[in-house]
Image: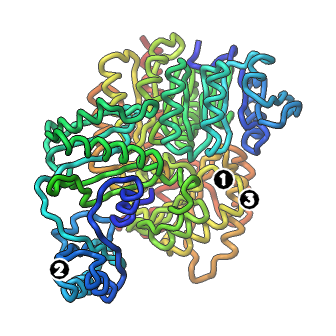
Amino acid sequence: MSVLVDEKTRVVVQGITGHQGMVHTHQMKEFGTQVVAGVTPGKAGTVIEGVPVFDAVRDAVEKTGANASCIFVPAPFAMDALLEAVDAGIRLCVIVTEHIPFHDMLVMYRYARAAGARIVGPNCPGIASPSKAKVGIIPNVVFRPGRVGVISRSGTLTYEIVNGIKEHGLGQSTCIGLGGDPVVGTSFVDALPLFEADPDTDLMVLVGEIGGTAEEDAAEYIHAHFTKPVVAYIAGRSAPPDKRMGHAGAIIARGRGTAETKQAALERAGARVARFPYEVPQMVAEIAAARARR
Amino acid sequence: MVKLAEWRGKALFRKYGIPVPAGQVVRSPEEAEQLTGSGSVPLPCVVKAQVLSGGRGKGGAVRFASSAKEAREATAAILGLDFKGEKVREVLLEGKVAIARELYLSIALDRSLRLPVLIASAQGGVEIESVADGAIDHQGIDPFPGLTGYERRRVARTFGLTGALAQELDSLLRALWALYEGEDAELVEINPLAIVGDHLVALDSKVIIEDDAVFRHPEYAEIQDDRTPLEEIAREKEIAFVQLDGNIGVIANGAGLTMATLDVLMELGGKPGVFLDLGGTDDPKKVTEAFLLMAEAHPRAVFLNIFGGVTRCDTVATGLVAAMRQVPESNRFPLVARIRGNNEKEGIEILRAAGVTSIADLRASAEAVVAAAGGRP
């Protein structure tokens, strides 16, 4: 097993004819993902990276049985793309697009939720279950199949840490990049139960950052419901208050959502909190070794 | 984040039908004298510096005038003030009103709820952070029906308003919600919302427009934010660039990795000065521009920390080498590089040919740059 994506995942790429869409369709296929269709309005009949392109998501679903969408559509049109995917019956939508107005995302989130669909992202690197499927843009080289689950709000920092886990001779069950925007479709608290229920995940890595209270919420959930060991790292300890740090999410406002409050909450919940990114794989390796000795 | 000055916020209030005092923005003492003298702005009036920082009252940036001459003098005294690092260039003149009660009202985003929240308190006129939790009412507002009648009635109850005032509040809340949605606001705050005679009046405004929505509102693209000149140039080039107090420049990609890099440098005794997030570029020209921008900030040493995903290591290396050739002798600085990920080998080779060694280990490379910048400050 794995979480959210596996060998049964059939991906439709929305915005497949754009630069990012093409590059990552190629990468997803290299990873072993079944990319079955692409959608770009007006481009039906084209073939990109061996993948047939359709005008509408509904056509793609009918003709190819696509059951997950990866959205690269530019921000002004991303809401329309998501609504189209949900209305066509897609129940997992990974939105890579950045700079989507949060007002749009508020509507998208409520709409998807009402239909029973899950959004991962926006502004996210996506989901990967090594040796099974990848929906998104995480570089293929960092992965190795294994039993560590990873959930992260960051992109490149996730690659760094996942790569570190590989270099320690371990691998991942599934890695989910949640995205760094103020409103995300899937939060730590939404993703943790999936890993709790996954028999192929032994331990979790959480990569958080300053801003918002998603990590504090995660700590509460872990304390009450999560039974597997957790290693966490929070980026942005040295960030000055009220300075925007790139991600819309990465801003500390009025003393809430600081690295200190997040680290303390996670420690209280029983997680091991790394001070440096390179300590995460070390801690993971220690926990895995201790489990192996049992 | 586009923070609007009070007068711009009030212009929006007027557009959406939220009552504000009669007033005008001026940029010279003569204008102030003329507008009050002609009765365009009623006397006595309040003279308020148009700055984005709070605490204007205590900071001497708000004055009163009862004649046109006093209005001119007050404006002259406030214009050009340095208020918490902001130079006062505009002043708002408004007719003074007799306040019976001060209330608080805002709409902001609750990230955990993934909903806008309508926040109301009967204790307005002070910073909302200083009001006890029990005296603040929060309501999550679903964007689908929008702000409903029962939610609006709850605010009237929170404020203790009935009859005609409750009716006025109802229209005001509809207008506030329309503004929040229509202008793609991150925050709309009225503090205080005053009861003046038998009416509600918004005495202050705080409106923040979301950056990502500016494509729908080109009028906000021109508005100055609280950026330094280099941050402004970076914004135009779509590079995330932040200036801090230290002396080590950091070029990384992705917000999380950038922040983690700063954390490691600080922990090792270094002082990051400027950091620059390349984001997901695969254009060598953008890397060159970023590097030249970094040179403008005169760092003691620069740390390049890239994990290639969308960004390819060879692209970054090519852009970097091109930029190094363009930096004049007087602006050169030691460079420590760490490039990992996609096309790592090619990138390292390009850097080696230009005389730059890439250190694979994060800690070792961070230590090298801290030493190059002169060690612990």
User: Which one is in front in this view, the residue at disc 2 or the one at disc 3?
Assistant: 2
Residue A145: percent from left, percent from top: 62, 22
Give the amino acid at mark 3.
Ile
- Residue position for label 1: B281
- Residue position for label 2: B65
Helix, strand or loop under label 2: strand
Taking the image as drawn, is residue B48 in sight?
Answer: yes
Please state the chain letter of the residue tagged with numbered disc 1 in the rendered image. Answer: B
Give the amino acid at mark 2.
Ala
Q: Is residue B247 left or right of residue A270?
A: right
User: Which one is in front in this view, the residue at disc 1 or the one at disc 2?
Assistant: 2
Give the amino acid at mark 1.
Thr
Which residue is depicted at the point 48% across and 28% down? A110
Taking the image as drawn, is residue B341 in sight?
Answer: no
Comes first in the chain, label 1 or label 2? 2
B80, A134: nearer the viewer:
B80
Would you call the spot at circle 1 few (<14 residues within 10 Å), some (14-19), or many (20 or more)?
Answer: some
Which residue is depicted at the point 41% across and 57% down? B15
Please state the chain letter of the residue tagged with numbered disc 2 in the rendered image. Answer: B
- Residue position for label 3: B350
Comes first in the chain, label 3 or label 1? 1
Residue A63: percent from left, percent from top: 81, 17
Would you call the spot at circle 2 few (<14 residues within 10 Å), some (14-19), or many (20 or more)?
Answer: many
Which residue is depicted at the point 68% across and 18% down? A67
Q: Give the number of the disc on residue B354.
A: none
A205, A167: nearer the viewer:
A205
Comes first in the chain, label 2 or label 3? 2
Q: CA distance from mark 3 to mark 1?
A: 18 Å
Which residue is depicted at the point 33% across and 73% down? B24
Q: CA distance from mark 2 to mark 3?
A: 67 Å
Q: Are marks 3 and 1 in contact (CB under 8 Å)?
A: no
